[in-house]
Structure formats: C-alpha cells, structure tokens
Amino acid sequence: MIALVLAGFSATMYGISDFLGGIFSKSVSPWRVAAVGQTSSTLVTAVMAAGMSLAGSGGSATGADFLWAMFAGLGSGIGAAFLYRGLARAKMNVVAPISAVGCALLPVAVGFGLGDRPGLLAVVGIIVAFPAIWLVAQTTDNDPSHSGGVLDGVFAGIGFGLMLAALAQVDPDAGMWPVVSMYVVSALSVAVIALILGHGLMPRNRTELRPLLLGLVGAPAALAFYYATHYGLLSIVSVITSLYPAVTVILAAIILRERVNRTQGIGLAMAVVAVVFVAW
C-alpha cells in the first residue's frame, strides 16, 4: 500500500506538471518550458539532497546508481523534448495518448522481464490501465495535425518509459544525489536536442520564467516514483504513475471549466477500476 500511495502521489504531481506545462506553453515557447522546467527540477532536488546530507541521511550511492540515474535523465530529456515538440506542431489527441501508453509499456515490460509476478487482480488492473491511459488522454479536437506528431509521441513515450525503468534500478540506499544527476542529464539533453533543431532556450522576460514552478511538482513526482519502486513491483508502480493524464483532465475540468468528453469519462472510470484492482 505504501508503493500504491507513492505511485498515486507521483501520478498526481506529474498530472499537475503537465497541466501547468500546457498553460505555460500557450504564452512561452514549448522548448523554453521544457528547458526551464528541467533546470528547476534539478535545483529543487539538489536543495533537498543537500538538506538530507546535512541531516546525515544522504545515502551511499555507487557508480552503478549514478549510471542508471544518468540513463534515466537521458530518457527524461528525450521524453520532454519530443513531447513538447509534438504538442507544438501537432494536436494533443495525437501526441499525448501515444506518449502516455509508451511511458507505461516499457517499464511494465522491464518489470516482468526482471521477475515481477503480480497477482491475478493486479494483472487485470494493469491490462485495464492501458486503454484507460489512452482514452483519458483523448480530446474532441478534430483539427488536422501533422503526421510527425505520431513519431514525436512514440519518442516521448520511449523516453519517459526509459526514465521510469532506469530510475527503478537505482539502489534504495543510494539517497537522492542520483536523482539530482538524473535531472542534470535531463536538462542537458533538452538543451542539446533543442539546439540541434535550431530552437532558443534562454528566457527573455519574466513570463518565460514561470515554468520554474514546474520543478516544485516535477521533482517530487520523480522522487515519489523512485521510492515507490523500493516498496512495490515496477510493473505495478509504473502503470499507476502513468495514469497521470487523468489528473490533468480533472484539473482542466475544475479550473479551466473544460468539458470532459464521453471518451475521457470512460477512461477515467477505467482508471479507477485499474487502481482498485491493483490495490485489492
């Protein structure tokens, strides 16, 4: 149950992060949102790790822990870069469902490959979660979108899936410094990809600094997932975390008064069923 609570918290924080990122992207370049957000998460985790070290609980990370964390950072950077590029040039109903399902699929496969053997109800919950993730991320926006959005969604899903699968391999006693290194690599990856594609990253005014808030929710989301994998199976923790689009949709309905369409409603109901089955 500790793993389930932490995974649920991670999903909530990631959902809030996506909600805020979507709002910021309406007035700020998506590339700047990604770069500033990842940098902010780096600073937040560094402050938290320093505080834990001063308190005498900094952990004992090995070279292998930092290597896995850097792999996770590479995945995080790739995921963020292609997700925001996809959202910038295509419609959300093309990019978001593909990236969200991919985010869950890879770590679930890795979990089963490493020996995860959840109970029957949990397996049913995992199976139900995949269509739930897809449906809840759908929108009714039928405007034409570029076919490149599909490929961006695939790359984003692979990136985020790699992040979750690799971060889960960091030793429970490693502490938070590997997570800091993950975000350092993530921010650098976003910067390199953006520069290769010819996009500027430096904020030009105060408005473009608003994505700094993303670190306050993105960093706790990653940390919650990191610790959840210490208490539960990767295959279960990752699929619960990947239900984050449900939180984004609910926030949009409450705060922005956006209507939850029938498809999303079915997806939300299936997400509840998935969580209940896993928890049972």
Image (tube, rainbow, N blue to C red):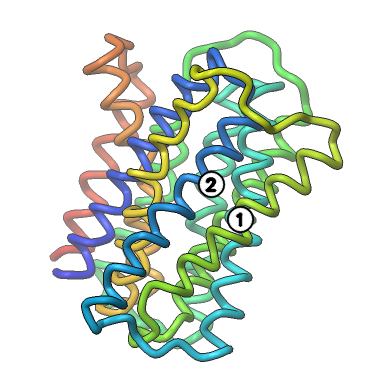
Element carrying mark 1: helix
Tell me the crowding category of disc 2: few under 14, some 14 to 19, or many 20 or more residues within 10 angstroms, Cα based: many
Q: Position of residue 201 (x, y in %)?
A: 69, 33
Q: Residue at point 36% right, 60% down? A: 47
Query: Could you tell me which quadrant the C terminus lies in?
Result: bottom left
Report the residue marked by disc 2.
Answer: 38
Q: Residue at point 51% right, 91% down? A: 62
Q: Give 244 or 142, whichever is nearer the viewer.
A: 244
- How many angstroms separate mark 2 from mark 1 (CA)? 7 Å
Q: Quadrant of residue 1?
A: bottom left
Q: Are marks 2 and 1 in contact (CB under 8 Å)?
A: yes
Q: Position of residue 66 (x, y in %)?
A: 55, 79
Report the residue marked by disc 1.
Answer: 186
Please indicate whether residue 70 sits to the left or right of residue 48 in the image. right
Q: Position of residue 5 (x, y in %)?
A: 18, 60
Q: Give 140 or 162, whichever is nearer the viewer.
A: 162
Between disc 2 and disc 1, whose residue precedes?
2
Q: Amino acid at mark 2?
A: Gln
Say if 2 sits above or below 268 in the image: below
Element carrying mark 2: helix
